[in-house]
Image (tube, helix red, strand yellow):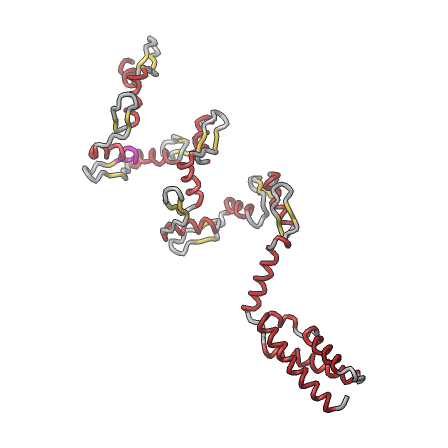
Amino acid sequence: MSAMNVKKLLVVLTLTLFSTVKFTLDKNPMSVLNVGKEFIVERNLTSAENAGKSSTDNHTLFSIREFILERNLMTVRSVAKPSVHDYLSFGIRESIQEKSPMNKPYGCSVCGKTFSQKGHLTQHQRIHTGEKPYECSECEKAFTFSVLSSLVQHQRIHNGKKPYECHKCGKAFSQGSHLIQHQRSHTGEKPYECNECGKTFAQISTLINHKRTHNGEKPYECSDCGKAFSQSAHLIRHRRIHTGENPYECSDCGKAFNIRSSLIQHHRIHTGEKPYECSECGKAFSQHSQFTQHQRVHTGEKPYVCTECGKSFRQRSHLTRHQRIHSRERPYTCNQCGKTFSQRITLKVRE
């Protein structure tokens, strides 16, 4: 091959190379990660070799190959340096590929859910088996998931760690999710909406409990008496009737209560606090229920109606007492003579 022909061949191959590199970069900026790979120029060299079949100068062709590869490397380096966007795009594609069904070879034999990693499948299967291998060294409570999640959060109960602080009021929390919920008290955000009535809530758990007022669902059942409740907190409170547990104790007199709200109301006997004031007459009350009943004196509201005769009452207890006229129920018995009465006050007067 003459020097002139070699020069012409170099010009043709160089122009072809530049157009190939530019097209590749335009179509896929991440091809810069494949810098120096010969496959871009191999096609061009093969074409050149076929075009110049009469050439037997292997040294010349080798030199051409080396020249083009060197120029390829330099061109790619100078034309397109990978940006943050390029790397992020590459990462997103990798993530999408990882999440595709073909990249989730580990399947749960119980529910069919698939996972990309065997460890994730192992953790998931504990939902079905009930296995809780992670135990708290303080109280021996066990958890399904690893020390990086459930157990670590639980241990903050013992060590008092509250790493999540509200920048508005400075209140701190042991869990990030609790901080997010708390911040809604400042912003007024209520992102969870009931599709039945449109009422909104700050917490999804409150929405779930609320929705049971529409569907009548009561999933929490007492194992002692069979009574069912829509909320787990209501079942816990109810069970104290059977166990006799009164965990809330008054620091002033030692009297104990089975629900916290009862202790708060009781405390007002000692403090004299009456936070509920009537805007009509100025009378104040220590309990909200008393305040609500009192307001009916002004409004005339009587929401409790007898199904037998239609008579209505301001208080539920008055309706209950009235209904005994129809049912002839006499639940109060005198210990002295055995006589029965429909009202407790009548029995007390007799005694």
Left or right: 103 as drawn, with respect to 318? right
Q: Quadrant of the N terminus?
A: bottom right
Residue 220 among those drawn in magenta: no
For residue 236, say whether it is visible. Answer: no
Give percent across and percent down for residue 341.
31, 14
Give percent across and percent down for residue 194.
40, 44
Residue 209 vertical placement versus 68 (above, below): above
Residue extending furthest toward the top:
337
Give percent across and percent down for residue 198.
37, 45
Residue at 33 percent across and 35 percent down: it is: 265
Residue at 55 percent across and 46 percent down: it is: 150
Left or right: 338 as drawn, with respect to 41? left
Residue 134 figure quarter: top right
Magenta residues (range)? 285-291
Q: Quadrant of the C terminus?
A: top left
Residue at 62 percent across and 41 percent down: it is: 110
Left or right: 65 as drawn, with respect to 74? right
For residue 214, say whether it is visible. Answer: yes
Depth check: give the residue in front, 322 or 258.
322
